[in-house]
Every structure is written in structure tokens, then in C-alpha cells.
Image (tube, coloured by chain):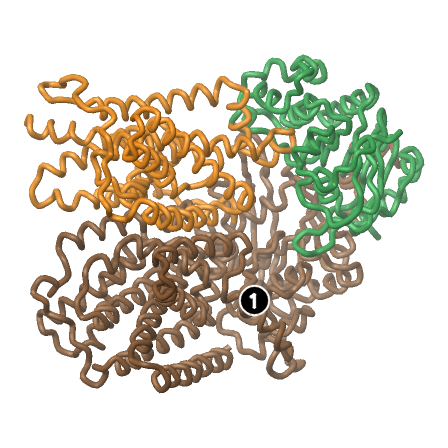
Chain colours: A green, B orange, C brown
Amino acid sequence: MSSLVVSSLSVSRGGLPIITEASLSAASGEISVILGANGAGKTTLLEGLSGVIPVEGGMIAIDGAEIQSARPGVRARAGLLHVEQGRTVFRQLSTEDNLRVGLHADERLETAYALFPELVQRKAVRAGLLSGGEQQMLVIARALLGRPKVLMIDEMSAGLAPVVVTRLMTAVRKLADKGLAVVLVEQFAALALAIGNRAYVMRRGRVVYDGDCSTLRRAPDELHRLYLGG
Amino acid sequence: MNELLTSAVAGLTAGGTYALLGVCAVFTYRLVAVVNFTGAAIGTAGTFVLIALYEAGFPLWPSVLAGVVAGTIVGVLVGLVMTTWFSEANASTKAAVTVALLVGMIAIGLRLTGGQHPHVMPDLFPGSAFRLAGVEVTIASALTIGLAVLFTVLADRFLNATRTGLHLRALSERPMAAELLGVRVQLLSVLVWAVTGTFTTFALMIIAPQRSPNFMTLSLLVVPALAAALVGLFRSFWITLAGGIMLGVVEGLASSFDGVSQYRGAIPFVVVVAVLLWSQREARWDDAR
Amino acid sequence: MMRASVRASLAIVVTAVVLGGALIGLLSSYWVFLGTAVLITGVALQSLGLVVGRTGMIALCQMSFAGVGAWTVGYLNIVGAPGGLSVWVLLGGLAAVPFGVAIGLPALRLRGINLAIVTLAFATAFDTILATITFPGQTSFQAVPRPELFDSDEGYFVFVLGFYVTIAVALEFVSRSRLGAAWLTVRHSERAAAAHGVSIAAAKLSAFALSAFVAGISGGLLAGYLGTLVSENFSMMQSLSLFAVAVMAGAHYSEGAVIGGLLVTMFPEILRRLGLPQDIGNVLFAVGATQALSTGETMSETFRRLARKLVPSRGPNGKPPQPASLPAPVMHAAGAALSIENLGVRYGSVVALDKVSLAVPAGTVVGLIGPNGAGKSTFIDAVTGFLPLYYGRISLEGKLLEGVQAHRRARLGVRRSWQTNRIAPELTVGQYLRLAADGLSDADIAAVLAWLDCPHPDTPVASVDAGTRRLLDVAGVLASRPAVALLDEPAAGQSYEETLRLGKRIAEIPKLFGSAVLLVEHDMDLVRAACSHIAVLDFGKVIASGPPAQVLAETVVKTAYLGVEAEEAAA
């Protein structure tokens, strides 16, 4: 049973169609990886899903309930949480206050600290002063405390050192194993495919590949071609 | 010497009002990113509800309460206009909208209150609170300053110690990130407008007996209020508070000098120019553009 | 461009003569008298349109400037200055200019809101001062005399119409000039304006000074219209209400100013005749302004849109662009056009660029690639002067750029394109190129546009799609034939075929325009087609550089793009 079902979604930005008829799904306990070169429309896709920008057409459903015309806050409260790219911490707030912003009534801060113990000793520090890796952990943990059914993470590895990326990937896999549905938009294709279940590849706003991560992983030439062209 | 002190102290009521209005302006700017030109007009609307009820023979304090409620409602209405149609607009457009709303509010206000027709504004707090170096400090001035300090302290406590305050701080920094975490952004924004509506109404009620209670004159108290907010660079509550009181005191002082007193109204302009020249020593690129 | 200005000016003059003649010939003196008020308000609105509509700043003391003009005219009348009203009106306009500059200066930088606050404060101050000093002749009942020739109501109408038309025509020419394009660009994006070499301070200040001049004239005209004035004519409330009308009607259009004048003058008249209170007018202006701000469309723009629907346009006017030859390349010195040594940028604790060294030799195209967040855009920002602080040395043809402001760097020959669309939609394609490259002939502009498959110069930018706007951005950079062109992802939004074609074009830039190119791009096919040399940025450091084929095959590059396990995955 898929937690998130998206069918024939179209999104425009500034009058220019960016996403055309994209369909995908994410199931509880699984990671759906969305790959593609820059400008393929991955970020716009997530923004359409979470409501940052309005969608032109198509359907988005969380556990069967359609949400494509709801405000972003409503979609978040329905269980679709979006971790934007660029590590959007509240820079002036402390780490702990950041975690509290979206805290679900039945959720406790310990859940976040259990996932990323690194944050415990930084909890009184202003989030703007954290390192890039810590900020990324913070935004993921922050979204997690909102009790999501589906967690969408955009470009979490951008600009981070490999060792940190590995750490984050492991944590995300752990979340999925506990029953969360994860949508992971990534540039670091290899690592994402290693932890992912289902893979989608986007090109010029369309989903051009839909299959298992393991299949795509065994075809590095195909991957290379998608990324560097030629 | 004593004469100077007397005129300085006489400016304290106005100073306290400017301070409170200025702090409200900073509150609105910091939390919902609007430079609000309707601030004083919102309070004026509430004040005139009080005047109307009082003139119609209703008892004073229930009328005050009704006036404060009315001011709060007007604040909420302005807030609804801003959040419904202009939540995504840039700061400049939002400010332009509040200017347009100010024009409309003054027109409606003048119409409903009979223009320059004189009104009886009851002095809510007559009398003197205490003597300072032989000079009477009125209850009204002590109260406005006290209220401004109270608002600043409360705002500070509220923002830093409550969950709603936390949401507001998150909202002010990154509205979209807050909304994506499920924060009820629209509701909170309207709450900000309601709170500032309540406080400005009360401030206006205290200063109204000192001014000609005319809808336009009172609405234009937004000028010294924004000047005070600018002193605090639209950031610091305490500096804004000090700036507002200082403005009032300087006005009071100016009124004791012949040849200067009739130009009192130009003082906020002088302050604004001075602050702007001082604050733009360094060039900066507008973040948004 | 000149032709368009002349055509528009002729239209204004003919319309004014026909409508003005009809008004005088057909209607009674009373209506002519009201018509004069419409035009005087129209002049004040034109002055406001200049600031509000063109540069996007909020000005709330326009009637105070008018008051300065009126006061000056009154004073010149009392002292018996020579020249009569027409000269006095001009002097009144000039008298308002120093006030405009003095108020504009403190508000140039930081948030644009500052101008709103300072102008409102000035309007209050002016109210108090005017109430105290009163108008010259106000107490002695010495009216300002109209010129003998224009003494009657009809005559004075013609007098005012002359001023209105002259100002409208002058503004028409200014708005189509490079300065006018600079104003619109400043409104849209200050950074983009600076990247074209426009000084933001000069652009804003010139608009504000000119606006004060025109407002001063409107005050002088009002002095002649009413004879004697009182301070209420120029009160702050008048300024505020004028602002609402300007926003509602779109006062930066010549018809918008007249529509606004009609609203201000006729609304109270209609309400009076209907027996309704006249101050309802301001409520409607407030609602209209709010509506215009929320839809982003003023009354003038609505009328123009409807008119275009009714009368389908014949497409861009003028001849189709001839396959003219490109403007001659500007010869730049051989050697390193751009040289960067140990460039470092930090944002707080984050190191965005770390000791980056890179040279772009004259006559070459160098590519800068790397994954998201590698620091490529930061690099361009640093080189073009949009970062307040960086470490290291950036030099253009051997000249160190340390401490040189962005618009000065642009003038020296460091030009850039943008990832996000920053072209003012109100411009035409031709006007945009003229802003980017001063002094090009129409044929040159048409040739540069044709070379990059951009639309005809008369096409409004608003009707150009996002992908083509990027090309237009590039065309602007190239038309100025700079020493170095920094192109930030020009191929985004292009189809595959277009991308390949663009790659070939970019490779030709050094030969055809004389400019060295630094190309930031994600599309590797484009990079292969265009660049002779590439550098790869990762975590703010250059991790590889050399010929494209060789660099793209390096393991370290694949790792940067595909992630840490690329080797294992490939193995």
C-alpha cells in the first residue's frame, strides 16, 4: 500500500511548464529515489507536491486523501513533510527551538536526538552557527518530529563531505525501516541507489525511468550517460 | 532650568505614545514583514468608537472596552487584507497597500466622525502621578510609557517563552519553512495584527485628549511612530522605545522656544533624515532582488 | 527607438489638440475650468508616475514639492520678478529639485521602504512650515496673474495643456532612452541594473529630482489657476490621495495621468451632483489602488490590454531584421583577460570558495562546472562585485578589481548573465539591448539578436518565454562586447537541439565579439561543444582542470558528480 500516490502531475513556473505529467508513488517502509541532471525538474516536483508552488493538473494523495489543492500547512498536517534544499534552518533560533517548531503533540524531542545524537550537545546553539552537516541533520530531524507519513528530502548531500553524506544516508534508511515512506531527491546517485528501493529518473520535466534501484545500480554506464551526457 | 524641565516632561505623554506606536510598528515589521502605515489609524478607529459611545451617554469604562475591541477588529481586518492577498508580495508592495488603506480609512473615518467637527474626548487618566524635581508628571505620561515598556517586556517574554511565540519567530524568519512544518501561518499573522490593534488603540485613547481629536490628525501620528521605529532600525524594541520617548521630549522642549515651537511638526522629519544618513554608511544589496 | 518616441509623441500631440479643441469648442466655460484642473492634477500625477511607476519607489510628498513650486511662483509675483507666469512656473519646478535631491539622498540604499517614511515625514514637516509661513500674497490678497494671452478660462486651459503635452512628450523620450530603461530595471532588480553598469544611486536620484521638478511645475500651474493659494491645497492628505490614484491609474502612462486627473477632479463633481458626500472618492481610490496592487495591473494597463484584444496588433512594426553583419569585435589585450588568484569566500562558518585560482585567457571559452552547491554562482558574484567581502586577487587584464563596485566593474568590461530572470518585462527587446550596450546602432542590435535567435527588437519582453529571455540576457552581455563575459547557465530551459546550437555559438564568441568567456553550465554536451578548457569546482575548491574530454573522464570528477561510491558502482 503506497502512502503517497502522484499521478499525471504538471507544474509550471513563471508560465513555463517545468513538470509534465509526472507519476510516482512512495510506500511505507521504502525509499523512492528521484534522480536526474540539474534542471530536470526534481526540486520543482517536490515543491509542487508540498504546495510551495501550485500545481497545474494531476492528483496527489496521502493515504488515499487528495491534497493537491490544499495550502502547504494543510498538506504538512496531513502527513506530507518537505525538507527543502539549502538547509532551511531558522538561523536565529537555537537547535532545540528549531526542533520544537513543528513538534507533533504526541512526539518528543528525544526521537530527534536518538536519530542524530550529534545534535544533543549543540541544542542550545543558534542554528545559523551549526556546520552544514549539522544543519542538514537538524532539518531532517525537525521534519521528523511532525509525525510525517511521507518525508520528502531535497538534495540533502549537496555541498557536504562524503563521510557526512554516508551518515545521513544511513539515518534515512533507518527511518524507512521503521515504516516511514521517504522520497529522496539526489545528485549523489550511487549512494542514493544503494539505500533506495524504487528509482525514478527525470529528464526535462518528465519521468523517463521507473524501476528498481538495484537494476539501475547494476548499469553504471546508463547512469553515467544520464548525468554527464555524451 | 526648571522651565525647560517642565516642557520636557510635558512631552512625555506624547513620547510614550510614540514609543508604544513605534514598538507596535517594529513588532508588525519583524513578525509579518509589513511596514504598517495604518498603525495609528487602527487605534484611531477604536478611539472614535469610545468617543461615539461616550457622547451617546454610555458609561466611560464599558465604552473604553468596546473601543479597544473595535480597534482590535479593525486591526484584524487590515491583517486579513494583507494575509489574503499580499502574503507573497514584496515589502515595498505591502507598504504601498497600507498607504492606500490609510487613505481609505481616513476618508471613512472623517465621514463617520463629521470631519473637523469637535468631539469630546474624555480624559481617561487626569491628574498627576508624582513630582519629579518639582515638576508634575501626569498619570497619562507615566501610563503611556509604562504601557510601552510593558508591551516591550511582554512581547519579549511572549516571543521567547511560549510555543506560539516560537512559531512567530520561526514565521518571521522563514514563512515558507514554517508553513511546511505545519505552522498555522495565516492565523498567526492575523493574531499579530490583532495584538498591535489592541495596544495602539489604548495608546491613542490616552493621547487623544491632548491633541485635537480629529480622525486625520490622530491617524497621522504614524509619522512619529515610524520615525521612532526607524531609530530602532525596525529591529530593536528597546531602542525604538527610547527613540519614541526622545521624540516626545524634544517636541516638548521645542515648544518652549519662541520661533521654533510652531515648527514642532518637522521634528520627526529631521530625526528620520538623521537616522537614515547614519544607518546607510555601508551599501548593501537588497536581499530579495 | 527614436522613431518609436517620435511616433508616440505625435500621437500625444494629436490627441491633445483634438480632445483639447473639442473640449473648448463644445463645452461651457465651467467644464473647461474643470478640464484645466484635470490637466494640472495630471501633471502632478506624471511626476509621481516617474517615481512610483518607473523606479518602483513609494513617494508620499508629491504635493509638498508642488507646494514648493507654487510658493516660488507666489514669491516671484510679490517681488515682481520679470518673465511672467511661464518663466515663474519653470523656476518653481527648479526650486523643488534641491528638495527632491535632499530627500532622495538619505533613502537611496537599504530598504526601499525608507523613501516612503522620509517622504511622509517631509510632507508632515512641510504642512507645519507652510501653515506658519503662509503663501506669499495670501494675507495681502495679491493674486498670481495669468499671462495676458491666456487669461480667460479657455486660454489658461490651452496654457496648461501646453505644459502637459510638453512634459508628456519629454517623458516619452526619456522613458525610451537608456535612462528610462535603467529606471525600470532598477525597479525590477537592482543587481541586474548594476550588472549593466548602471549606477543605482544615480538612477534613483535622477528619477526623484526630475519628479520633483515636474511636481513643482504642477504647483506653479495651480498658482496661476487659483490665483491665491492656501496651505490645504498641498496638505499631506492630498499627497497620500494622489499616491493612491497614481497606483490605481498607472500614472507613468501619459493616458494614465489623465485618467487619474479625471478621477480626482470629476469624482467629487459627480458625487456632488448626485448629492453624495464628496470624500467617498478617497475610499474608492484606496480600494482601486489595493486592487491594482493585488492584480499587478493598473487601469491604464487594463485599458491597453483590452484595446489590444479589440485591435489585434499587426505584429512588431518596421522591417524584418536584415541579415546584417555583427558589430565589429572590440579588440582586447592578449594574455589573461581575467585572472583569479586564491579567491576565498566565507558565509559565517561555511567556506563557499577556498583558494580558487583560475585564469581566462583572452580569446578563449573556459568552462566552470561542478555539482550543486560547489560554489559556481558564488564565484561569479565575487568576480562581478556582488559580494561585500572576499579574499584573494581578482584582476581584469592585469588591473586589480579590489574595492571596485559592481557597476564600475561592468563598465570596465566584466559582464555577467543571471540564472534567474532579471530582465524588466516592461521593456522591449531592443530597449533592453540598448540598456546593456550603449551606443549600438539599430542594425547592430538586430544583428546580435538574430545571431542568438532572439525575437525582433520591437517585441515586448513580457511576451518572450523564459528560455528565450536567458538568451536575451546573453545577447545583452555580448552586445556590450566586454573583455570578459561570465555566462551563468545560459542553456537552462532550452531544448536539446537548441542547447547544441548555443554551444557552437558560444565557441564563436571570442572571434566574433572579442570577448573571453567563462561559462558556468550543467549541460555537459554544451560544455563539450563550447569550451577549450574546463575547471571543476567541488566544495569550493578546484579539483580538476584541463581540456573537457580529459577532465570529464577523470575519476575524481565522476566522484564529485555521482557520489562517493562511483568507483564501486562502476566496478
Q: Amino acid at mark 1?
A: Arg
Examine the image and state in which quarter residue B210 appears: top left
Viewer can see residue C276: yes
**A123 or C405, nearer to the observer:** A123
Q: Quadrant of the C terminus of chain C?
A: top right
On screen, residue B227 above or below C473: above
- When the figure is inspected, residue C230 is found, relative to residue B103, above or below; the finding is below
Q: Is residue B123 left or right of residue A192?
A: left
- Across and down, in percent, residue B267 comes to 21, 42
Q: Nearer the viewer, residue C190 or C245?
A: C245
Which quarter of the figure has residue B249? top left
The front one of C517 and B245 is B245
Q: Residue at x 66, y 39 (%)?
A: C373
The residue carrying mark 1 is C481
Q: In x, y percent, where is residue C27?
A: 35, 82
Q: Is residue A73 above or below residue C145?
A: above
Whether residue C331 is visible:
no
Q: Residue at x 36, y 41 (%)?
A: B41
Place of residue C17 in the rendered image (x, y in percent of width and height, measured from the top left):
39, 84
Give the x, y percent position of residue B18: 29, 34
For label 1, the SS is loop
Label 1 neighbourhood size at 10 Å, few (<14), some (14-19), many (20+)?
Answer: many
Q: Please indicate whether residue A73 sits to the left or right of residue C496 in the image.
A: left
Q: Residue under mark 1: which chain is it in?
A: C
- Give left or right: position of C114 versus A185: left
Instruction: Looking at the picture, tell me which residue is in the foreground, C193 or B73.
Output: B73
On the rendered structure, is A216 left or right of B234?
right
Q: How many marks?
A: 1
